[in-house]
Amino acid sequence: MRVKSRNILRKTDEKALINDIIEAFGDASTFANKKLEYVMTDKWDLILVNGEPLLFKFNGKIFPTVRGALKLNPVQRRVMVDPGAVRFIINGADVMGRGIVEADPSIKEGDLVIVVEQTHGKALSIGKALVPGKDMAGRTGKAVKSIHYVGDELWKFEQK
Protein backbone atom coordinates (compact mmCIF):
# COMPACT_ATOMS: atom_id res chain seq x y z
CA MET A 1 0.00 0.00 0.00
CA ARG A 2 1.53 3.30 -1.16
CA VAL A 3 0.93 6.63 0.60
CA LYS A 4 -0.21 9.35 -1.83
CA SER A 5 -0.61 12.23 0.63
CA ARG A 6 -0.50 12.90 4.34
CA ASN A 7 -1.90 15.94 6.19
CA ILE A 8 -2.51 16.88 9.80
CA LEU A 9 -6.23 17.58 10.33
CA ARG A 10 -7.28 21.16 10.97
CA LYS A 11 -9.01 21.82 14.29
CA THR A 12 -12.42 22.29 12.58
CA ASP A 13 -12.07 18.98 10.70
CA GLU A 14 -10.88 17.30 13.89
CA LYS A 15 -13.95 18.52 15.82
CA ALA A 16 -16.30 17.37 13.05
CA LEU A 17 -14.65 13.94 12.99
CA ILE A 18 -14.90 13.55 16.77
CA ASN A 19 -18.57 14.63 16.69
CA ASP A 20 -19.27 11.99 14.00
CA ILE A 21 -17.62 9.32 16.16
CA ILE A 22 -19.58 10.37 19.24
CA GLU A 23 -22.82 10.30 17.23
CA ALA A 24 -22.08 6.84 15.80
CA PHE A 25 -20.48 5.14 18.81
CA GLY A 26 -21.06 7.32 21.86
CA ASP A 27 -17.41 7.75 22.86
CA ALA A 28 -14.45 9.50 21.28
CA SER A 29 -12.13 9.80 24.29
CA THR A 30 -9.54 7.69 22.41
CA PHE A 31 -8.98 10.68 20.11
CA ALA A 32 -8.82 13.47 22.71
CA ASN A 33 -5.56 15.45 22.69
CA LYS A 34 -4.01 13.21 20.01
CA LYS A 35 -2.35 14.06 16.70
CA LEU A 36 -4.88 13.26 13.93
CA GLU A 37 -3.64 12.89 10.35
CA TYR A 38 -5.51 12.24 7.11
CA VAL A 39 -3.60 9.82 4.88
CA MET A 40 -4.57 8.91 1.33
CA THR A 41 -3.14 5.65 0.02
CA ASP A 42 -3.63 3.90 -3.29
CA LYS A 43 -6.35 1.78 -1.65
CA TRP A 44 -7.70 3.49 1.51
CA ASP A 45 -8.20 6.92 3.03
CA LEU A 46 -7.11 6.66 6.66
CA ILE A 47 -7.19 8.71 9.84
CA LEU A 48 -4.04 8.11 11.86
CA VAL A 49 -4.21 8.75 15.59
CA ASN A 50 -0.68 9.32 16.87
CA GLY A 51 0.54 7.42 13.79
CA GLU A 52 -1.79 4.44 14.22
CA PRO A 53 -4.51 3.74 11.58
CA LEU A 54 -7.63 3.72 13.79
CA LEU A 55 -10.19 5.00 11.27
CA PHE A 56 -10.73 4.61 7.54
CA LYS A 57 -13.09 5.99 4.93
CA PHE A 58 -15.32 3.59 3.01
CA ASN A 59 -17.89 4.88 0.52
CA GLY A 60 -17.61 8.35 2.04
CA LYS A 61 -18.19 7.16 5.63
CA ILE A 62 -15.62 7.19 8.43
CA PHE A 63 -15.50 3.93 10.38
CA PRO A 64 -13.03 2.29 12.78
CA THR A 65 -10.42 -0.08 11.40
CA VAL A 66 -10.05 -3.36 13.28
CA ARG A 67 -7.35 -1.66 15.39
CA GLY A 68 -9.73 1.25 15.99
CA ALA A 69 -12.51 -1.12 17.01
CA LEU A 70 -10.16 -2.83 19.47
CA LYS A 71 -9.34 0.56 21.05
CA LEU A 72 -12.88 2.03 20.96
CA ASN A 73 -14.62 -1.24 21.87
CA PRO A 74 -17.99 0.05 20.64
CA VAL A 75 -21.18 -1.78 21.60
CA GLN A 76 -23.14 -0.60 18.57
CA ARG A 77 -23.01 -2.15 15.09
CA ARG A 78 -21.48 -5.36 16.40
CA VAL A 79 -21.97 -8.80 14.92
CA MET A 80 -20.82 -11.62 17.22
CA VAL A 81 -19.62 -14.91 15.73
CA ASP A 82 -19.02 -18.32 17.30
CA PRO A 83 -15.45 -19.65 17.74
CA GLY A 84 -15.78 -21.95 14.72
CA ALA A 85 -16.06 -18.97 12.36
CA VAL A 86 -12.97 -17.13 13.63
CA ARG A 87 -10.33 -18.91 11.51
CA PHE A 88 -12.28 -18.23 8.32
CA ILE A 89 -12.94 -14.56 9.11
CA ILE A 90 -9.29 -13.76 9.93
CA ASN A 91 -8.41 -15.16 6.51
CA GLY A 92 -10.78 -12.70 4.81
CA ALA A 93 -13.91 -14.82 4.40
CA ASP A 94 -17.35 -13.24 4.38
CA VAL A 95 -19.46 -13.93 7.48
CA MET A 96 -22.09 -16.61 7.05
CA GLY A 97 -25.36 -16.39 8.97
CA ARG A 98 -24.86 -19.81 10.54
CA GLY A 99 -21.75 -18.56 12.37
CA ILE A 100 -23.47 -15.51 13.86
CA VAL A 101 -24.70 -15.87 17.42
CA GLU A 102 -25.83 -12.28 17.97
CA ALA A 103 -26.15 -9.02 16.01
CA ASP A 104 -27.14 -5.47 16.89
CA PRO A 105 -30.83 -5.29 15.83
CA SER A 106 -30.40 -1.64 14.77
CA ILE A 107 -28.07 -2.67 11.89
CA LYS A 108 -29.59 -1.95 8.50
CA GLU A 109 -28.69 -3.58 5.21
CA GLY A 110 -25.65 -1.75 3.81
CA ASP A 111 -24.35 -0.53 7.19
CA LEU A 112 -20.70 -1.01 8.10
CA VAL A 113 -20.37 -3.43 11.02
CA ILE A 114 -17.71 -4.71 13.41
CA VAL A 115 -17.41 -8.50 13.53
CA VAL A 116 -16.32 -9.72 16.99
CA GLU A 117 -15.60 -13.16 18.39
CA GLN A 118 -17.86 -14.57 21.10
CA THR A 119 -15.31 -15.65 23.70
CA HIS A 120 -13.53 -12.34 24.37
CA GLY A 121 -15.55 -9.84 22.32
CA LYS A 122 -12.46 -8.79 20.31
CA ALA A 123 -12.83 -7.33 16.82
CA LEU A 124 -11.89 -9.61 13.92
CA SER A 125 -13.06 -7.72 10.87
CA ILE A 126 -15.03 -4.83 9.46
CA GLY A 127 -17.72 -5.62 6.95
CA LYS A 128 -20.82 -4.46 5.15
CA ALA A 129 -24.18 -5.86 6.30
CA LEU A 130 -25.94 -7.79 3.54
CA VAL A 131 -29.12 -8.19 5.63
CA PRO A 132 -30.63 -6.32 8.61
CA GLY A 133 -29.15 -7.18 12.03
CA LYS A 134 -32.37 -8.76 13.30
CA ASP A 135 -32.22 -11.30 10.43
CA MET A 136 -28.52 -12.23 10.62
CA ALA A 137 -28.18 -14.91 13.31
CA GLY A 138 -28.66 -18.45 12.09
CA ARG A 139 -29.70 -17.62 8.53
CA THR A 140 -28.32 -19.54 5.56
CA GLY A 141 -25.93 -17.77 3.23
CA LYS A 142 -23.79 -14.67 3.63
CA ALA A 143 -24.80 -12.02 6.15
CA VAL A 144 -21.73 -9.73 6.13
CA LYS A 145 -19.34 -8.94 3.25
CA SER A 146 -15.78 -8.67 4.57
CA ILE A 147 -13.98 -5.37 3.82
CA HIS A 148 -11.01 -5.36 6.24
CA TYR A 149 -9.77 -8.05 8.63
CA VAL A 150 -6.98 -8.94 11.06
CA GLY A 151 -3.83 -9.67 9.08
CA ASP A 152 -4.67 -7.81 5.85
CA GLU A 153 -2.56 -4.95 4.44
CA LEU A 154 -4.53 -2.27 6.32
CA TRP A 155 -3.97 -4.18 9.58
CA LYS A 156 -0.23 -4.33 8.82
CA PHE A 157 -0.05 -0.66 7.72
CA GLU A 158 2.62 1.28 9.59
CA GLN A 159 3.40 4.91 9.00
CA LYS A 160 7.11 5.66 9.08
Image (tube, rainbow, N blue to C red):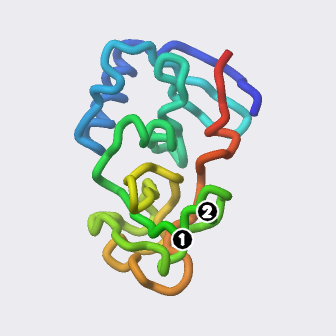
For label 1, the SS is helix
Q: Amino acid at mark 2?
A: Arg
CA separation, marks 2 and 1?
A: 7 Å
Of residues 11 and 103, which is closer to you in this image? 103
Quarter of the image with the C terminus in it: top right
User: Circle 2 sits on which residue?
Assistant: 87
For label 2, the SS is helix
Residue ID at (34%, 43%): 73
Q: Residues within 10 Å of mark 1 (few under 14, many from 20)?
A: few
Picture mark count = 2
Residue 115 against residue 152 in the figure, above or below? below
Instruction: Answer with the quarter of the image where residue 63 lies.
Output: top left
Residue ID at (40%, 64%): 80
Q: Amino acid at mark 1?
A: Gly
Residue 88 location, x and y as percent? Answer: 63, 65
Residue 17 location, x and y as percent? Answer: 36, 29
Instruction: Answer with the quarter of the image where residue 134 lies.
Output: bottom left
Q: In the drawing, does residue 53 fall left or right of residue 12?
A: right
Q: Residues within 10 Å of mark 2 (few under 14, many from 20)?
A: few
Residue at the limit of the structure toward the right, as seen here? 2
Instruction: Answer with the quarter of the image where residue 11 lies.
Output: top left
* Proximity of marks 2 and 1: CB atoms separated by less than 8 Å: yes
Residue ID at (37%, 20%): 14
Quarter of the image with the N terminus in it: top right
Residue ID at (35%, 23%): 31
Residue 105 location, x and y as percent? Answer: 28, 69
Residue 66 location, x and y as percent? Answer: 51, 43
User: Circle 1 sits on which residue?
Assistant: 84
Q: In the drawing, does residue 104 fall left or right of residue 3?
A: left
